[in-house]
Amino acid sequence: MAKESTSKIVSKKHLARLDRENRQQRILQIGAAIVIVLVIGIISFGILDQTVLLNNKAVARVENDKITVAEFEKQVKFARWQMIKQYESTLQIYQMLGADPNYGASFLNNLRQIQSQLSPENAATQASTVLEQLITNRIIKHEAEKRGFTVSEAEVQEALHTAFNYFPNGEPTPTAVPSLMATSTLSPLQLTLAPPTATPTALPTPEASEPPAETPANTPTTDPALPTATPFPTSTPYTESGFQQAVEDYLAQLKDIGFTESDLRQLVYNNLLHNKVYDAITADISREEEQVWARHILLKDEPTAQALLKRIKNGEDWNKLAAEFSQDTSNKDKGGDLGWFGKGKMVPEFEEAAFKLDIGQISDPVQTQFGYHIIQVLGHEVRPLTDTEYTTLRQQAFDEWVQAQKETQKIEKYDLWMRVVPVEPTLPPDMVL
């Protein structure tokens, strides 16, 4: 009887221990399962964060309008593709003319510059330019919304037709636009003062201050993100099917960077919207401006300038003194003639002095970064602008407006953009010089 009782007691303890061990094992199994799920979740989130979620993150914001990683990366890749196309075109010309010492060095230098810009070391510089343009696009978009400007699908389609030289209603006939030519009737005083070789209607480029670079007449500067380097085929598809094929061939070149027809239409849309805002912002720019016609003698120091000014006031010939003493070699043999110029063309100190002078009046020595100038004004009037001058003035006004918007609107750029800068596409190895 004692043995049977002891056996039952031991058996209960054993069962209790087994039950406890089973519970502990289940807890361990559940804990391990949770850890595995968490690890898988973390890995999955990491993959998701670096793909889908990353593409939707913002690299910048303009007010509440975000610029995503996906948009930024695509535009940078497209900009790089454009540069590669430019490189290919330049390389072809270089291969044809490279042996010519008058042209070869220039084309080679251009090729090396593009090659340097496409290098991984300089990728962030180009990407930064693209980001700034995307910010500008948002500013233009917001201004268009304020003004009620829209771009229809029909406008986009027509612009695409034109870009691919397809004119379903017949090719438009070019309209000649006469360029205004400023002319002046010189007074007896001006005829007396003007040097023998003076050309008051010309617009020479003084060394003291170079005018802005020329841009095509009456053509606003468009979105740099748009195709510029051999963007579209030069052949002319005369049928709808030919046009569609040309678009498909063009997009086939961009397949590797994920650039689609939708992206192309968006670029055209942005460009058309840009032009509408550009025209509105620059609508009040006059086609004429106040200008002066001046000549100068540039001296290296003030004592020399004062001594020469005294000789001029004592009646010595201006033209002979300019030819002998002026440091401005570009016009010293023409009496220092700078021709007509408007405001913003010369360094500020020179411009301020010139516009204050009456016709025939000679200034005291005016100091600029180039030295000391003795200035005489030969003419002062409101004159019509050339097409190039008018376009330049409009572009300056628009650029100033964009800069003012960037200073007043809430614009945020995040460091993320520097971590997602694409370094592809790249130049084919056989093209690298």
Image: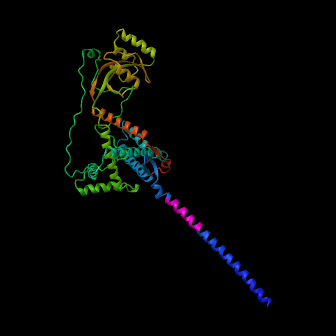
Q: Residue furthest right?
A: 2
Extent of the magenta region: 34-48
Up/down of 380 relative to 310, above or below: below
The spot of residue 105 in percent (x, y) is 40, 38
- Asked which quadrant contains residue 262, the reply is bottom left
Check the image and report above or below for 12 versus 290: below
Percent from the top left, x then y, of residue 43? 54, 62
Q: Residue furthest top?
A: 314
**41 within the magenta span:** yes
Q: Position of residue 109 (x, y in %)?
A: 42, 40
Please state the horizontal and vertical placement of residue 432, each as a whole percent of the image.
44, 48
Q: Is residue 430 magenta?
A: no
Work out whether residue 422 can be spotted: no
Give the color scheme: rainbow, by chain, secondary structure or one colour.
rainbow
Residue nearer the viewer, 331 or 148? 148
- Of residues 155 and 309, the one drawn nearer to the viewer in this rendering: 155
Rendered view: 95 above or below 1 = above
Q: Considering depth in this image, is 390 or 114 the residue closer to the camera?
A: 390
Q: Which residue is at 37% across, 14% downward?
A: 321
Residue at 20 percent of width and 40 percent of height = 175
Q: Is residue 44 visible?
A: yes
Q: Main secondary structure of the magenta part?
A: helix
| Residue for point 35% across, 43% down | 143
